[in-house]
Amino acid sequence: MLLLLVAVGTTIAYIFTETEPVENTFNPSKVSCAVVENGYEPVSGEIQNISDIKSNVQIKNTGDTDAYIRVAVVVNWMDEAGTKVWATKPVEDTEYSITYANKTNWVKGSDDYWYYTKSVPPTDGSNLTEILIEKATQNTEGPKGTDGTQYYLSIEIVASAIQSTPETVVENHWGVTVENGVITPKAN
Protein backbone atom coordinates (compact mmCIF):
# COMPACT_ATOMS: atom_id res chain seq x y z
CA MET A 1 0.00 0.00 0.00
CA LEU A 2 2.85 2.35 0.93
CA LEU A 3 4.62 1.46 -2.31
CA LEU A 4 1.44 2.23 -4.31
CA LEU A 5 1.03 5.65 -2.64
CA VAL A 6 4.67 6.53 -3.33
CA ALA A 7 4.30 5.48 -6.99
CA VAL A 8 1.10 7.56 -7.47
CA GLY A 9 2.60 10.55 -5.65
CA THR A 10 5.76 10.39 -7.77
CA THR A 11 3.71 10.19 -10.98
CA ILE A 12 1.57 13.19 -10.03
CA ALA A 13 4.65 15.18 -9.03
CA TYR A 14 6.30 14.32 -12.34
CA ILE A 15 3.23 15.41 -14.33
CA PHE A 16 3.03 18.76 -12.53
CA THR A 17 6.74 19.50 -12.86
CA GLU A 18 7.13 18.39 -16.50
CA THR A 19 3.95 19.88 -18.02
CA GLU A 20 4.43 23.44 -19.30
CA PRO A 21 1.50 25.82 -19.30
CA VAL A 22 -0.24 26.37 -22.63
CA GLU A 23 -0.75 30.01 -23.62
CA ASN A 24 -3.93 30.69 -25.54
CA THR A 25 -3.39 33.68 -27.84
CA PHE A 26 -6.46 35.36 -29.32
CA ASN A 27 -6.25 38.28 -31.74
CA PRO A 28 -9.62 39.90 -32.42
CA SER A 29 -10.34 41.16 -35.92
CA LYS A 30 -10.38 44.88 -36.65
CA VAL A 31 -13.21 46.36 -38.71
CA SER A 32 -12.61 49.90 -39.97
CA CYS A 33 -12.86 52.04 -43.10
CA ALA A 34 -11.81 55.42 -44.48
CA VAL A 35 -13.02 57.82 -47.18
CA VAL A 36 -10.71 58.05 -50.21
CA GLU A 37 -10.81 60.50 -53.11
CA ASN A 38 -9.20 59.91 -56.51
CA GLY A 39 -7.67 56.62 -55.33
CA TYR A 40 -5.33 58.30 -52.86
CA GLU A 41 -4.85 57.73 -49.16
CA PRO A 42 -7.76 58.44 -46.76
CA VAL A 43 -8.67 62.11 -46.60
CA SER A 44 -10.63 64.39 -44.33
CA GLY A 45 -13.12 66.85 -45.75
CA GLU A 46 -11.85 70.35 -46.40
CA ILE A 47 -14.12 73.30 -46.99
CA GLN A 48 -13.42 74.96 -50.31
CA ASN A 49 -14.73 77.90 -52.26
CA ILE A 50 -17.05 77.56 -55.27
CA SER A 51 -15.35 74.69 -57.08
CA ASP A 52 -15.29 70.94 -57.05
CA ILE A 53 -15.87 69.91 -53.45
CA LYS A 54 -15.60 66.14 -53.76
CA SER A 55 -14.59 63.89 -56.62
CA ASN A 56 -14.21 60.17 -57.21
CA VAL A 57 -15.21 59.26 -53.65
CA GLN A 58 -14.60 55.65 -52.63
CA ILE A 59 -14.42 53.85 -49.29
CA LYS A 60 -11.36 51.83 -48.29
CA ASN A 61 -11.48 48.81 -45.99
CA THR A 62 -8.67 49.62 -43.52
CA GLY A 63 -9.41 46.68 -41.22
CA ASP A 64 -8.18 43.11 -41.36
CA THR A 65 -11.39 41.26 -42.21
CA ASP A 66 -14.01 41.38 -44.97
CA ALA A 67 -16.56 44.11 -44.26
CA TYR A 68 -19.76 45.62 -45.58
CA ILE A 69 -19.70 49.41 -46.05
CA ARG A 70 -22.42 52.05 -45.81
CA VAL A 71 -22.22 55.82 -46.20
CA ALA A 72 -24.22 58.84 -45.10
CA VAL A 73 -23.78 61.97 -47.23
CA VAL A 74 -24.25 65.05 -45.04
CA VAL A 75 -24.46 68.45 -46.75
CA ASN A 76 -24.29 71.74 -44.81
CA TRP A 77 -23.14 75.34 -45.09
CA MET A 78 -20.04 75.88 -42.88
CA ASP A 79 -17.66 78.73 -42.23
CA GLU A 80 -14.10 78.49 -43.52
CA ALA A 81 -12.76 77.30 -40.15
CA GLY A 82 -15.37 74.54 -40.00
CA THR A 83 -16.63 75.74 -36.62
CA LYS A 84 -19.99 77.31 -37.52
CA VAL A 85 -22.89 75.70 -39.39
CA TRP A 86 -25.53 77.81 -41.19
CA ALA A 87 -29.02 76.87 -39.99
CA THR A 88 -30.54 76.35 -43.45
CA LYS A 89 -29.68 73.22 -45.41
CA PRO A 90 -28.36 73.79 -48.96
CA VAL A 91 -30.80 72.97 -51.77
CA GLU A 92 -29.64 70.14 -54.03
CA ASP A 93 -29.58 70.84 -57.80
CA THR A 94 -29.86 74.58 -57.05
CA GLU A 95 -27.08 75.51 -54.64
CA TYR A 96 -25.05 72.34 -55.14
CA SER A 97 -24.95 69.28 -57.37
CA ILE A 98 -23.82 65.72 -56.67
CA THR A 99 -23.17 63.28 -59.50
CA TYR A 100 -23.44 59.75 -58.17
CA ALA A 101 -21.74 57.00 -60.16
CA ASN A 102 -24.06 54.87 -62.31
CA LYS A 103 -24.05 51.10 -62.73
CA THR A 104 -22.13 50.37 -59.54
CA ASN A 105 -22.76 48.20 -56.50
CA TRP A 106 -23.98 51.22 -54.47
CA VAL A 107 -27.68 51.26 -53.55
CA LYS A 108 -29.52 53.94 -51.58
CA GLY A 109 -31.75 52.59 -48.81
CA SER A 110 -34.95 54.08 -47.41
CA ASP A 111 -32.91 55.26 -44.40
CA ASP A 112 -30.89 57.59 -46.72
CA TYR A 113 -27.70 55.52 -46.31
CA TRP A 114 -25.83 54.37 -49.39
CA TYR A 115 -24.96 50.65 -49.08
CA TYR A 116 -22.19 48.90 -50.95
CA THR A 117 -23.89 45.62 -51.81
CA LYS A 118 -20.77 43.42 -51.73
CA SER A 119 -18.36 42.79 -48.91
CA VAL A 120 -15.01 44.52 -49.32
CA PRO A 121 -11.84 42.49 -48.62
CA PRO A 122 -9.17 44.11 -46.44
CA THR A 123 -5.80 43.80 -48.16
CA ASP A 124 -5.79 41.95 -51.47
CA GLY A 125 -5.56 45.08 -53.62
CA SER A 126 -9.32 45.37 -54.08
CA ASN A 127 -9.95 46.94 -50.70
CA LEU A 128 -11.73 49.94 -52.25
CA THR A 129 -15.38 50.16 -53.14
CA GLU A 130 -16.37 51.38 -56.55
CA ILE A 131 -16.81 55.14 -56.87
CA LEU A 132 -19.92 56.48 -55.11
CA ILE A 133 -19.66 60.18 -55.91
CA GLU A 134 -18.07 61.15 -59.20
CA LYS A 135 -18.27 64.87 -58.50
CA ALA A 136 -19.88 67.31 -56.09
CA THR A 137 -19.98 71.02 -56.87
CA GLN A 138 -21.13 74.19 -55.15
CA ASN A 139 -23.27 76.03 -57.72
CA THR A 140 -23.91 79.34 -55.95
CA GLU A 141 -22.16 81.53 -53.47
CA GLY A 142 -22.90 80.48 -49.92
CA PRO A 143 -24.85 82.62 -47.47
CA LYS A 144 -23.30 85.40 -45.39
CA GLY A 145 -24.02 85.68 -41.69
CA THR A 146 -25.03 88.94 -40.01
CA ASP A 147 -21.51 89.11 -38.59
CA GLY A 148 -20.05 88.96 -42.12
CA THR A 149 -19.06 85.28 -41.93
CA GLN A 150 -19.00 83.69 -45.38
CA TYR A 151 -20.36 80.13 -45.49
CA TYR A 152 -19.19 77.44 -47.90
CA LEU A 153 -20.58 74.10 -48.93
CA SER A 154 -19.46 71.20 -46.75
CA ILE A 155 -20.11 67.66 -47.91
CA GLU A 156 -19.20 65.14 -45.26
CA ILE A 157 -18.97 61.47 -46.18
CA VAL A 158 -19.66 59.49 -43.01
CA ALA A 159 -18.68 55.89 -43.69
CA SER A 160 -19.13 52.88 -41.45
CA ALA A 161 -18.06 49.26 -41.77
CA ILE A 162 -19.32 46.04 -40.21
CA GLN A 163 -17.97 42.49 -40.39
CA SER A 164 -19.37 40.45 -43.24
CA THR A 165 -19.56 37.11 -41.43
CA PRO A 166 -21.75 35.89 -40.00
CA GLU A 167 -24.33 37.62 -42.18
CA THR A 168 -26.77 37.87 -39.28
CA VAL A 169 -24.56 40.60 -37.76
CA VAL A 170 -25.12 43.05 -40.62
CA GLU A 171 -28.79 42.02 -40.93
CA ASN A 172 -29.46 42.65 -37.23
CA HIS A 173 -27.47 45.87 -36.88
CA TRP A 174 -28.23 47.58 -40.20
CA GLY A 175 -31.71 46.16 -40.89
CA VAL A 176 -30.77 44.81 -44.33
CA THR A 177 -31.06 41.38 -45.86
CA VAL A 178 -28.12 39.41 -47.20
CA GLU A 179 -28.54 36.73 -49.82
CA ASN A 180 -25.57 34.98 -51.44
CA GLY A 181 -23.27 37.65 -49.95
CA VAL A 182 -25.18 40.59 -51.46
CA ILE A 183 -26.84 43.26 -49.28
CA THR A 184 -30.34 44.43 -50.08
CA PRO A 185 -31.36 47.51 -48.02
CA LYS A 186 -34.95 48.42 -47.37
CA ALA A 187 -36.30 50.07 -50.51
CA ASN A 188 -37.28 53.73 -50.75
Image: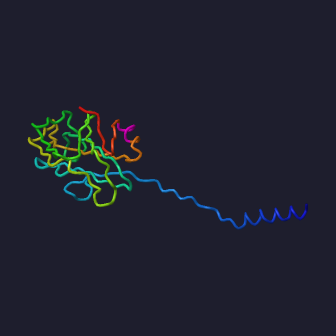
Residue 152 location (% of width, % of height):
16, 43
**Quarter of the figure that contains the N terminus:** bottom right
Protein image colouring: rainbow
Where 51 sits versus 85, above or below?
Answer: below
Question: Foreground residue, 180 or 96?
Answer: 180
| Residue 4 highlighted magenta (yes or no) | no
Picture residue at 20% right of the left edge, 40% below the top = 75
Left of 13 or right of it: where is 130?
left
**Outermost front residue:** 180
| 28 shown above or below 10 | above
The image quarter containing residue 39 is bottom left
Going 9% across and 42% down the picture, which residue do you hit? 139
Q: Residue at x 18, y 40 (%)?
A: 77
User: Which residues are drawn in magenta?
Assistant: 170-174
Query: In this rendering, is residue 13 above or below 129?
Result: below
Q: Main secondary structure of the magenta part?
A: helix
- The image quarter containing residue 72 is top left
Question: x%, y% of residue 158?
Answer: 28, 44
- Side of 160 where 9 appears, left or right: right
| Residue 154 percent coordinates (x, y) | 19, 44
Q: Quadrant of the C terminus?
A: top left
